[in-house]
Amino acid sequence: MNPDKRWRVVGLNFDHFHMGDLLRMVFEHPRAEIAGICDLRPERMQEAIRQFRLPPERVFTDPRACLENTRPDLVLLCPAAAEHAEWTELVAEYRRPVLIEKPFAASLAEADRMIAAMRRAGQPLAINWPLRWVPAHATTKRVIDAGLIGEVIEVHYYDGNRGPLYHGAAKVEREPTIEEKAASWFYSRARGGGSLLDYLGYGTTLGTWFLNGEKPLEVMCLTDDTPGLEVDQHSITVARYARGLSKFETRWGTFTDPWTHQPQPRCGFVLVGTAGTISSWDYAPALHVQTRARPEGFDLPVDTPQPPFRNPIEYFLDCLETDRPIEGPLSPEISRIGQQIVDTAVASAREKRALPLLDRPSVLPGT
């Protein structure tokens, strides 16, 4: 560990507004700096330039020029879901670590292209799922591993928001226009839009984390059909595991955003174990737990996150500094299983029938 090292981080592609959140984490990290930002559309970078006081020589519209001039230690990627593979392959040419914002990809084939490119480059790949850093869900994983509710046998997930254009970076509220929706990749089927691809990976990836890597046997999914839109705004996926069923539901159009006021149904997870249950709601200050000893239930205050587990930037930089592997939902291993379930759900919704879990020859060692 070199306490004097200053980590150089660049952000490429502002398709997803979460780039602003990731850059702020870099800006606030005591040993990191924003070495450069890049987007093909300069207007999308103006807020970041203003907020983080970036000089012109750190702002680019050509990603290759950005990578060649800044020589970063870490690259942040926030492209449209269907373009994750091509952007990861671009960065892999320069042999730089990649943190890409969720979802993993628009398909399992694209996810495997990303894994293969980073393996050839000899560099780590992490997929950031912001719900991983919600204290309630991190605490849930800790107490599951401690055996509080026995073995998890059911995962019930419901999540979403009012819509992807109703807020920007730092969750600033806004009201999108019809024209903005028409121009946004979130509402484009070809670019990986829709609530299913936006939110299902959260549930299936964290769900796989809670289930310690278990895969389902079969998946069935239905999506809504909103007139005037080519993508779904509501999906329900049922997965059959060896020991029972789990459910994953995504929704654009919740009554309120969960980070301001929890809607009904509540957003988050309910887990059923062999010896108890846990309700882990997004942003909640406590879990609600039932156990054999206390079947009436009780509230368990969530843990206060400690470094380096407070956000994805400090976590990934710590992994790079200590040469530790990426673990949990950010790892390609867990995220790939989540993507398998997503791919099967997409195919199930299209074919309107239950399907065995889809797979293809894995590029991950030992799988």
Image: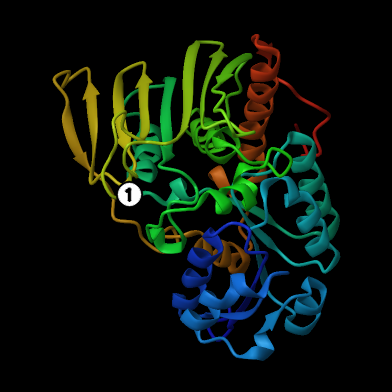
Image coords of residue 281 (percent x, y): 31, 37
User: Callout 1, which amino acid?
Assistant: Trp
- Foreground residue, 76 or 209? 76
State the image quarter where residue 15 is shown. Answer: bottom right
- Foreground residue, 121 or 98? 98
Image coords of residue 340 (percent x, y): 68, 29
Residue drawn at x 81%, y 39% is: 363
Residue drawn at x 41%, y 30% is: 158
Residue drawn at x 60%, y 90% is: 55
Image coords of residue 12 (percent x, y): 68, 67
Decide: few, some or many residues near mark 1? Use Cα within 10 Å; few <14, some 14-19, many ≥20: few
Decide: is 134 above or below 205.
below
- Residue 219 lies left or right of residue 280; in this view the side is right
- Foreground residue, 171 or 239? 171
- Looking at the rendered structure, the secondary structure element under dot 1 is loop
Total numbered circles: 1
| Image quarter hosting the C terminus | top right
| Residue 314 visible at all | no
Decide: is 305 above or below 112.
below
| Image quarter hosting the N terminus | bottom right
| Residue 49 visible at all | yes
State the image quarter where residue 187 is shown. Answer: top right
- Residue 148 lies left or right of residue 86; in this view the side is left
Residue drawn at x 56%, y 11% is: 242
The residue tagged 1 is 259
